[in-house]
Image (cartoon, rainbow, N blue to C red):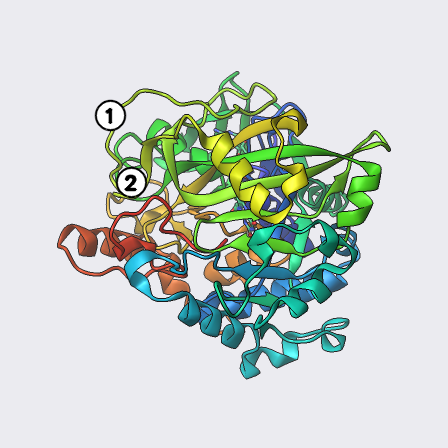
Amino acid sequence: MDSYDYVIVGAGVNGTSIATSLASHGFRVAVLDRSADGFVAPDGASHDLNKIVRADYTDANFCTLAKEAIARWRSSPVLRQFYHEVGVLFRSSASGDVWGNEGSAEEYVHKGIKHAALESDAHLEVFPAQEKARAYKLKNDTQVDEILGKARELKGDGFKGMGRVQTGYFNPRAGWAEANNATRALLGHAIKLGVTVYPDSSVDSFVYEAGEVVGVKTADGRVVRGDNVVLAAGAWTQELLTTLLPGVGEGWMTRPSAQCVAVVRLTREEAMQLGDTPVVINFATGFYQFEPTPTASPDEWHMKIAIHSNGYLHPAPQSSCSGTFPAFSCTDSTEQDAFGMAACSMPANQLEIMLEELRQTWPHLAQRERLVCTRVCWYSDTLDENWIFDSLANHPARPKGTDKVWVVSGDSGHAFKFLPIIGDVFLAAKRLLPNTRQLDLTRFTFNHHARTHADKNAGRAVQSADSNRAHSTPLANARARL
Ligand SMILES: Cc1cc2nc3c(=O)[nH]c(=O)nc-3n(C[C@H](O)[C@H](O)[C@H](O)COP(=O)(O)OP(=O)(O)OC[C@H]3O[C@@H](n4cnc5c(N)ncnc54)[C@H](O)[C@@H]3O)c2cc1C
């Protein structure tokens, strides 16, 4: 029977990064995933074309951590080829507000610029960052034209009116990463460091000895033993915990929220015109888009567009891994969200909403005929967008025998950018490494998350890690960043 120091369930950003850090410190590590090849599953959040990488959080903890992550994206021999520092352009659109009653667009811009350039983080700005401007406010359309370069000829009204009908800022020290490619490459690297990957391994029970968890068992009966178990199952965390330990996963800890993504097709010529354009975020609506990315066919390029929102309870993640992901679907349901944020079912006209947003930036691309696919992708949400990194021994239900079982989850839609560093955060939380970054690790504990729900239930304000969505009046899109 196979036995390891650490058995990790889930090969997304969290599982992959933790496996890499543990292996590089000499631990024997196994990663199990329900996917056919053992790498992140096609319906996993980390399995995607691209994800935004930025460090201008409103929260200093994440700000510093993201700057260090970016330094590693720039310099890592494994990851740097997947990082594209084209900048991120934030625009308010004419509607002005960010999260309704939580502050004005001007405040949002001011804070974003300030946090992008905290003096205390200056030592993290490694080459080539020093050659680039720091984040700056967009005061007129000439600045936008300079950023867009040759693509400015194609721009729509959404890029216009800076400093007059809308506000915004540009952070050149940010960009995007090739999500699936980078996650797979890092796990490939971890395998070279000695990590064993178990494909087609859907974990559905713990293995106990003398009342202690000593490993996991897959649905087809295989057992993998480990001195420690790490559950890094992304949006499946709640369901997995409920299966493993009835009563522990339910209710307050994390819950999946379905998010909407679409991909549109461009020709090579069209893609060349839009190449190197920044990620663009409309922070009033949560809509964002990337520059085009190549496909296996030299004549076809793809552009991902998406809406970052409070999300939807339906469709929910499926426990079986079909090798693909669901398209948008509008399901009838009256289920209530225990977090009080996600809507029950997504709007039937979701694609039209997204194409209308795209029309504001690149009008020539906003055509149904260009659609390659729509996709639902799930965040694992906590109430305040802080993650969970804690031992089940600290869970309020005190499940027996689980001292050496850790839950790493609650990504809340913003963990991808931390791929190069999240494993080290785990090692710090587990006290295998000193907390040299002076991170506030208490916010990642079960205690913290239980308290946020107690506060919410008692009508007290919940301070969110970034968007302040938890105590805003429920809005269709109360989130602002990812
Ligand atoms: C639409 C969308 C856009 C996003 N955009 C950004 C962005 O721009 N920037 C950013 O920083 N972040 C972004 N995120 C968030 C980011 O993708 C996530 O934070 C991150 O990918 C979560 O990683 P994970 O490892 O927790 O989960 P996942 O990547 O979902 O991986 C979980 C893995 O666990 C496996 N698993 C589950 N249950 C079991 C089981 N029982 N047995 C075995 N294996 C199991 C699954 O198969 C899966 O491979 C976005 C997320 C979404 C959905």
Residue 9 visible somewhere in the drawing = no
Q: Which residue is mark 2?
A: 399
Q: Are marks 2 and 1 in contact (CB under 8 Å)?
A: no
| Earlier residue among tags 2 and 1 | 1
Q: From the viewer's perspective, tell me whether residue 192 is left or right of residue 345.
A: right
For ligand 1, tell me if the residue under mark 1 lies within 8 Å.
Answer: no
Which residue sits at x=39%, y=50%?
391
Q: Which residue reaches farthest bottom?
A: 119
The amino acid type, in three-letter code, at marker 1 is: Thr
State how far apart marks 2 and 1 are (Cα). 32 Å
> Relative to 416, does residue 59 appear above or below in the rendering?
below
Residue 373: x and y, percent? 61, 26
Location of residue 363 in the rendering, given as x and y in whole percent from the top left corner: 63, 42
- Residue 189 position (above or below residue 443): above
Residue at (56, 47) in percent of width and height:
360
Please tell me in which quadrant of the rendered image residue 31 appears. Answer: top right
Residue 19 place in picture, x, y as percent: 61, 47
Does 146 appear above or below 26?
below
Q: Residues within 10 Å of mark 2 (few under 14, many from 20)?
A: some
Disc number placed over residue 142 in the picture, else none? none
**Residue 334: assigned label:** 1
Residue occupying the point 67% across, 56% down:
278
437 or 152: which is nearer to us?
Answer: 152
Residue 242 in picture, x, y percent from top left: 33, 30
Query: Residue at position x 23%, y 56% from top?
Result: 451
Q: Farthest top residue?
A: 220
Q: Of helix, strand and loop, which one carries label 2?
A: loop
- Given residues 431 and 149, the one toward you in this image is 149
What kind of residue is marked 2?
Pro
Q: Categorize mark 1 by other alpha carbons within 10 Å: few (<14), some (14-19), many (20+).
A: few
